[in-house]
Amino acid sequence: MHFEQQHGSLQVVTIECLKDNYAYLVHDSSSSCTIVIDPSEAEPIQNVLNAKSWKPNAIWITHHHWDHVGGNLELQKKYGCPILCSRIDEPYVEGRTQTLQDKESVFVGHSQAQVFLTPGHTHGHLVIWFPQEKILFTGDLLFCGGCGRVTEGTHREMYHSLKLLKKLPPEAQIYCGHEYSLKNLEFAKSIWPSNKNIPLRWERLKKLRDQALPTVPEALQEELKTNVFLNAEDPHLINDLKLDSSTEPEKTWSELRRQKDAYR
């Protein structure tokens, strides 16, 4: 299944892949430019491209994990499109043709985006930010109500990468790499019971999932209110965790990640 949103001149198509992955098409109708982001498998993406008579101009990769790159080579073979990934990920992404560095600009038609290096989940993880349209593709850095596991980097790196996102406009629309929202918010409810916004958000997103609709995009302001991994400095969260009020935010964040890793 796929779902469509319009953001200024850009159309974003969310495509369900594998079990719970999201891949994205970003399309500019004025130039007919189409970008594929994180194609975990090729067939669902080809189906949408065929239905819309679009041809991808490039594939952009947030990070090298198999469930974000699995469709790369098949799409590249069919359409001849370049594959862009971070310079750090270059050795791990088959078919890559161009590498990107922190703060480099990329384009969909006339719409400019910036890529930011956000290590933690992986060493070379990127996020993609369209400032004019205020849309952000976060891969496995930030999820609705949660964040990715620290698989290659350090907790310190992940904490600071997430902190970078907090500087963006609160109305920024977040497109993440997985449909983990309800489970993330269940965890948040269990450790931050004093935050009454969390169960309200869970109920709202549960209604979407009951209709087989995605929980993306969500505004950054919702994450700032309810995502525990963006609130390691919050005294109420620290109190609910039964930590000392003087605990450094990085240590609070590490405790949050430790508890989430153990959560079932």
Image (cartoon, helix red, strand yellow):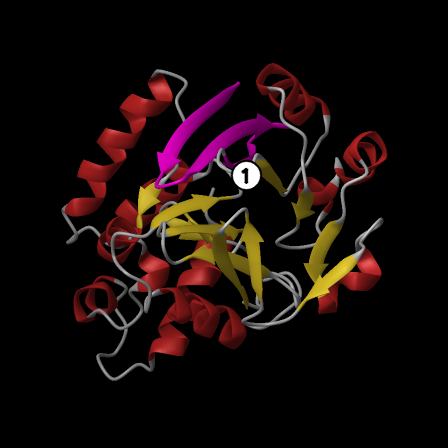
Instruction: Name the amino acid, label 1.
Output: Ser
Q: Quadrant of residue 206?
A: top left
Where residue 37 appears, x then y in whole percent?
Answer: 60, 43
Q: Closest to the observer: 152 or 134? A: 134
Could you tell me residue 24's position as x and y percent? 55, 36
Q: Which residues are magenta?
A: 1-28
Which of the 4 quarters of the picture holds residue 67?
Answer: top right
Q: Which residue does the image show at 36% across and 49% down from the upper left?
A: 133
Where residue 2 appears, as percent x and y from the top left, is: 50, 22
Q: Main secondary structure of the magenta part?
A: strand
Give residue 103's position: percent from left, percent from top: 54, 71
SS state under label 1: loop
Mark 1 neighbour class, 10 Å CA radius: few under 14, some 14 to 19, many 20 or more: few
Residue reaching furthest to the front: 30
Q: What residue does disc 1 label?
A: 31
Q: Is residue 76 left or right of residue 102?
A: right
Q: As drawn, is 215 to the left or to the right of 118?
A: left
Q: What residue do we see at 54% from left, 46% from top?
A: 109
Above or below residue 112? Residue 219 is above
Badge count: 1
The stretch drawn in magenta includes residue 14? yes
Q: Can residue 13 be found in the magenta stretch?
A: yes
Quarter holding residue 212 = top left
**What residue lies at 57% left-to-right and 67% top-to-bottom?**
120
Q: Would residue 58 appear left or right of 97 to someone viewing this image?
A: left
| Viewer-closest of 16 and 46 | 46
- In the rendered view, tell whether residue 248 sits above or below residue 135: below
Query: Does residue 215 appear in the picture of this structure?
Result: no
